[in-house]
Image: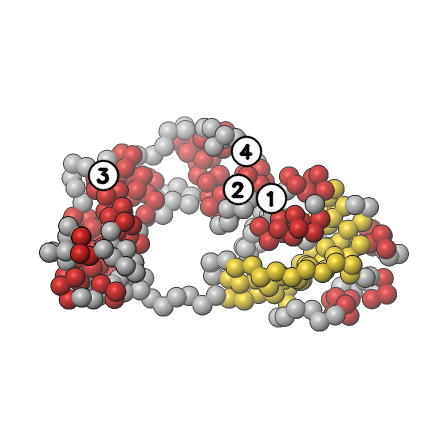
Amino acid sequence: MARFPTVFDLARAEEQEVLRLWQGLGYYTRARNLHKCAQQIVHEYEGAFPESYKSLIKLPGIGPYTAAAIASISFNEETPVLDGNVFRLLSRLFNISKDIGTIEGKKYFQKMAKAMISDFAPGEFNQAIMEFGALQCLPKNPDCETCILKSYCLSYSKNNQHKRPVKQKKVTKNIRYFNYLVFEQDNRLYLKKRDGNDIWKGLYDFHLMESGSKYSDLSQIANDINYINLKDISVYRFREYKHILTHLVIYAFFYHINLNDTNLKIDQFSLNGGKFYNKRDILELPKPVLIDKYLKEEIF
């Protein structure tokens, strides 16, 4: 907020700076969408934020919940919000057994919320129903005995609050193994900008070789990098981390290789688009939390 006080400032910024300032917050797609959204508002709306749900939903990074919240709270549009608190409250109040994770279930709750929303204070209604779910109608221990809605609550009368809302089973986390080779030469480290549609797009990390498991010894490294001979390298620092994301667990193994201790030269490397950075420049690069943690604990 301090760096980009207006939507025009954010629209003019370079993506790399936006990602660097976002570093540590996770969900980097949000930062990229925030940047794209600012640019679209400047270019298509001359910097004036759209005021209707239909316009808001077209902006990058703004989905149904966010569009409804902005339209109702900021512009008094009768558009209901549906978040976890609202799903929980409505499912208990009316004892709804529909799965909130399905398209059918979401449409059903949307229709119900639309019928209930206040026509004169939709923003206050949306904030109130979310707050009520967050403070009173709690997920595990709802305060039913002091609830002002208990005489109307069908789940309370049936004593099945703990079964509402109905949810799909939790998504199983995928597991990936990242083997990082941290090349250092002349007090500089090799990093590369991530591209494609994988995690951490636009951020910088070390030379990565993903495998089905942790490398067992140096011979595997040499085998995977055909331009390095085993006799030319030695790992003088090794660290491993377990990094947990929403739908992913990463087991990361860092092999720090000091090229000053070998006969290898930088021009012998063909590391696919990266370069060696001095440590001052590395501080300014946007990096995943995992890489930043390694740097702080082992390098800086």
Q: Secondary structure at mark 3?
A: helix
Name the front one of labels 4 and 3.
3
Q: Residue at x 16, y 39 (%)?
A: 119
Circle 2 packing at 10 Å, graded few (<14), some (14-19), many (20+), is: some
Q: Residues within 10 Å of mark 3 (few under 14, many from 20)?
A: some
- Mark 3 or 2 closer to N-term? 2
Q: Amino acid at mark 3?
A: Glu
Q: Quadrant of the C terminus?
A: top right
The residue that disc 1 covers is 286
Of label 1 and label 3, which has the lower sequence position?
A: 3
Q: Quadrant of residue 21?
A: top right
Q: Residue furthest front?
A: 145
Residue 50 percent location from the top left of the image: 34, 34
Q: Are marks 3 and 2 in contact (CB under 8 Å)?
A: no
Identify the residue at horizontal 19%, vertical 48% (top origin). 114
Q: Three-letter amino acid code at disc 2?
A: Trp
Three-letter amino acid code at disc 4?
A: Ala
Query: Pointers 4 and 2 in contact (CB under 8 A)?
Result: no
